[in-house]
Image (cartoon, rainbow, N blue to C red):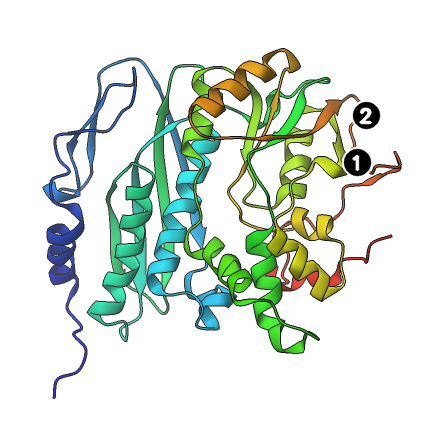
Amino acid sequence: MSGPAHSDEPTRVQQLITEFFSGQSGRAVGAGSLDVDLVAGADARDDCAVYEFNSPMALVVGSDYVRGPKFVLYELGLLSGFDIGYYLAIANISDVAAMGATPIGLLSVVRYPHDVDDAAFREVIAGIHQGCTDCGTLNVGGDIGNAERIILSATAFGVCRPGGALMRGGARPGDLLCVTGACGLLGAAVAYFPRRDSFAGSLPDETEKRLLDSWKHPRARVAEGRILGERGHATACQDTSDGLKATIEQIMRASGVGFRVVEDEVPLDPAVERVAGLMGVEPLALAMSASSDFQLAFTINPGNLEKCRADFADAGLEFHVIGEANETGRAESVNRRNVSRPLPGVAWKHQKTDISLLAAGLPKDR
C-alpha cells in the first residue's frame, strides 16, 4: 500500500500551475480608473510577473511574515494548513487595503520540511489562493522549497491614484476616530482555547465556532479602504492587526496628536464579552488588546462624516465613531462618568510572550 505522495519541487510547481494559476496572463487587474494589466502571471512560468500600467497611479507594496505552524491554535489542531495559508494572504492584503489601494497581486513564499506531503502542501497553497480570490486579486507566484519547518511569507501589491495613499500620519486635532467593526475576536480566541479546560465554565458551541471562524475566515477591508482613499474621506488610516489599542497609539505617534476614546462607543462582540467574563477581565480591555482583526481604524474631518457614512451605506458597509483627536499627545479613554484613564488593554509590541497569554494578565474592571 503506497503512502502519501511527496513530489519534487518542479512537479509541485506544475501541479500548482494547473490547479491555481492557469489563465492569469492577460487579465485586467485594476479597478475603476486604475488601468492595470497582468501581462505575464504565474502561468507564464517566468522569473517574474509582469504588469503594464496604462494610467498614472501609485504602487503600494507591503510584506509580512506569519508564524505558520507556530500559531497556537494550529498547534492545538484547531486550524488547518488551508487556514494558515488563507491567513497569510489576508494579513498581507489587509495592509494594502489600509492604504486605500486596490490589491493587484500577491507573491507568496512557502517553505516546508521534507515530511510535508503533496496533500498537505496543496492545502496551504489552496488557502492562499482562496484568500486572494476572496479579495479580488491573484497569487502571481513567489517561491517554494524545503526548509527545517513550514515558513510562510508574502508580499502584496496594490495601486491607488497618485497622492491617494492613506497614511498613519495625517490625523489632526478635531478629527473623529473611527473603526470599521468590533475588535478582539482573534485575541479572545487565543486567550480562550489554550486554557479552555481551566475555566470554571465553557462557552456555547456557537460562540466557540465564532471565535474559530475569526481565524479561519478573516477579512481584509478592501472595499472600506477604497472608499476612504478614492473619495478622500480619511485623514489617517491603519489596520488593527496589532490590536485596537496599539493601532490608536501608532496613529497618535505618527500624527503627533492625542486621542480621547469614548468607551461606550467602542463596539464589543458578544463572543469577546463572554471570554472576558470567563477570564475575569474587563471586556473593553480584552477587545482593545493584541488581536489580528484586520478592521480599519481611521480618522476623518467631522465635516465629511455624513458623506462618508452615506458612501459606506451605499456599499452595504458601516463604521463606528469611537473618539476624537486632540492636542494632548496622549491616548486616553473616558467612561460614562467622564472619568479618564490610559487606554485599557495590552498593546502588541512584539513581546516574547505569545499573544495567547497577553490578555491573561489584564486588570479586572475598576
Q: Residue at x 81, y 58 (%)?
A: 364
Q: Residue at x 62, y 78 (%)?
A: 197
Percent position (x, y) of residue 285? 73, 50
In the shown orientation, is residue 229 left or right of residue 4? right
Q: Which residue is mark 1?
A: 332
From what the image shows, is residue 43 above or below residue 148?
Answer: above
Q: Which mark is residue 233?
A: none
Front in this rendered view, residue 89 or 52: 89
Q: Residue at x 76, y 42 (%)?
A: 343
Percent position (x, y) of residue 295? 53, 39
Pointer 2 with pointer 1, Cβ within 8 A: yes
Three-letter code for the amino acid on which mark 1 is drawn: Glu
The quarter holding residue 104 reads top left
Quadrant (top left, top right, bottom left, bottom right) of the N terminus: bottom left
Whether residue 4 is visible to the viewer of this picture, yes or no, is yes
Front in this rendered view, residue 227 or 359: 227
Three-letter code for the amino acid on which mark 2 is drawn: Thr
In the shown orientation, is residue 47 left or right of residue 254? left
How far separated are the C-alphas under marks 2 and 1? Answer: 10 Å
Percent position (x, y) of residue 94? 44, 39
Q: Secondary structure at mark 2?
A: loop
Q: Residue at x 81, y 41 (%)?
A: 342
Percent position (x, y) of residue 277? 72, 61
Q: Secondary structure at mark 1?
A: strand
Q: Which mark is residue 328?
A: 2
Q: Classify mark 2: residues with Cα within 10 Å, few (<14), some (14-19) or many (20+).
A: few
Camera-side mark, 2 or 1: 1
In the shown orientation, is residue 44 left or right of residue 221? left
